[in-house]
Image (spheres, grey):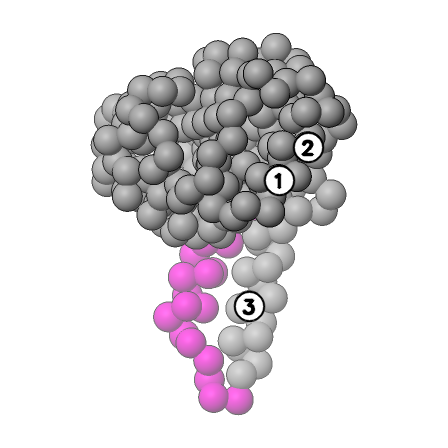
Amino acid sequence: MEVSKRIYKISNAIEYSTLADIGCDHCYLPVFAIQNGKVGSAVGIDVNRGPLEKAKENISQAGLSGKIELRLGYGLSPLKLGECESAVISGMGGMLICDIILKDIDIAKGFKQLILSPQSDVAYLRHALHKNGFCIYDEQMVLDKGKFYPIIMAKVGEDCQYSDFEYEYGKKNLLTPTEDFREFLKYSLKKNENIIESISNSSAGGDSYRKAMLEDENMLLRRWLEN
């Protein structure tokens, strides 16, 4: 199966043989992960019946009907504690991912590994993980077809405190920056510059506090890009 760079990177991050794919959509990730020997079996969960019907077809065509089980339901609720070792939650906002984890926190803490790929509110998610007893042990940023996708690997444990800048961009990313992450920093720098310019040109005077915060953030971004 040919998959996107994002799914390829998520699959490569899986460390254990049993996978739960939360919000599995058409089940491309579990099929690809089994075909490439990353996992032996998987459970695909989605809140909507439509995607699960398509997932069933994909699984059947791949000859994996005995290795991937599909379940209808919200988040982690259809799972039993300790049923799978790795869980992937991707393709949704960071606040929704937090809600899924906190709604079934005991099940979430039963995984050996969480792989999270939020589409928004990434700093919020990092804060929530730390606040609720998870450590972030690895991260990567993936540039796929012009869009940036963070991938956060977490597990139960204690983590060091992050600065605001590290919560925004990911401490692990900043310690070992990849080329895709450097491109993300450049993108963020340019985006901030555009917002600062818009605030400066506002006839109402703009939000001076936000402007100052963005200018401080850009100073740190430039420092990292110069390293």
Q: Residue furthest right?
A: 2
Name the quadrant of the N terminus. Answer: top right
Direction from residue 139 to residue 201 in the image, left or right = right
Q: Nearer the viewer, residue 26 or 220?
A: 26
Q: Which badge, 3 or 2, comes first in the chain's sequence? A: 2
Question: In what element is the residue under mark 2?
Answer: helix
In this orientation, does residue 135 appear? no
Residue at figure coordinates x 47%, y 60% from the top left: 215
Percent across and percent down for residue 133 are 23, 32
| Amino acid at dot 3 | Ile
Q: Nearer the viewer, residue 77 or 213?
A: 77
Question: In what element is the residue under mark 3?
Answer: helix
Q: Is residue 220 magenta?
A: yes
Kindly report the distance in space between the C-alpha atoms of the residues bearing marks 3 and 1: 43 Å
Q: Which badge, 3 or 1, comes first in the chain's sequence? A: 1
Q: Which mark is residue 195?
A: 3
Residue at figure coordinates x 39%, y 18% from the top left: 85
* Circle 2 residues within 10 Å: few <14, some 14–19, many ≥20: some
Percent across and percent down for residue 141 are 57, 36
- Reading the image, the residue beneath label 1 is 53
Q: Is residue 218 above or below residue 12?
A: below
Q: Is residue 180 magenta?
A: no
Question: In what element is the residue under mark 1?
Answer: helix
Label 2–label 1 contact, CB within 8 A: yes
Q: Is residue 220 above or below residue 68?
A: below
Kindly report the distance in space between the C-alpha atoms of the residues bearing marks 3 and 2: 46 Å
- Reading the image, the residue beneath label 2 is 57
| Amino acid at dot 1 | Glu
Per the rendered image, the range of residues in magenta is 203-225
| Amino acid at dot 2 | Glu
